[in-house]
Image (cartoon, rainbow, N blue to C red):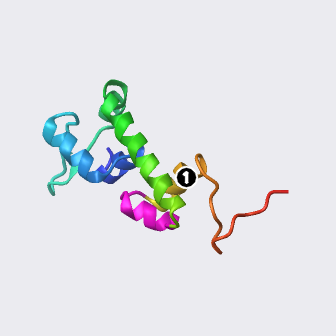
Amino acid sequence: MLKPREVAELLGVRTTTIARWAREGKLSPLRTPGGHRRYSRTAVRELLATDPECDTERQRMVEDAVRLYGQGWSIRQVADRFECSYGAMRRILMGRVRVRNRSGTYPTTE
């Protein structure tokens, strides 16, 4: 069972998008005794296979993240903006742009 934040990170969307999809019936949450939403991995895989909107939203988020990082935002600031973990955002950015080191400079490749 996955928490909404974990599902959001897997799909590359915000947790508010996961909540909206649950209201719309795209994802069916199970409720814990405390009332928290949990999602099965199977349901998440099925959504990925059937919903092209998921890819569109992820692509839009990636483009926005790359743009913000290019404007000088730190990885942590971009990750906070899109409500995902630092590590997930770093992986997203590393696949698309040259990532700065902690001092704000680009590492030299020799």
Left or right of 80 on screen, residue 39: left
Left or right of 64 on screen, residue 25: left
Residue identified by numbered label 1? 93
Residue 29 at least partly seen: no
Left or right of 27 on screen, residue 64: right
Identify the image quadrant of residue 83: bottom left
Residue located at (32% from left, 51% from top): 14
Residue 47: x and y in percent read 31, 31
Q: Which residues are magenta?
A: 73-84
Residue 10 at least partly seen: yes
Q: Residue furthest front?
A: 71
- Residue in the foreground of this view, choosing between 53 and 25: 53
Identify the image quadrant of residue 7: top left
Decide: is 58 above or below 98.
above
Residue located at (45% from left, 47% from top): 62
> The N terminus is located in which quarter?
top left
- Residue in the foreground of this view, choosing between 82 and 41: 82
Residue located at (49% from left, 67% from top): 73
Identify the image quadrant of residue 34: bottom left
> Is 76 colored magenta in this rendering?
yes
Residue 89: x and y in percent read 49, 55
So how many labels did they put on this image? 1
> Is 24 colored magenta in this rendering?
no
> The C terminus is located in which quarter?
bottom right
Q: Look at label 1 and name its amino acid.
A: Leu
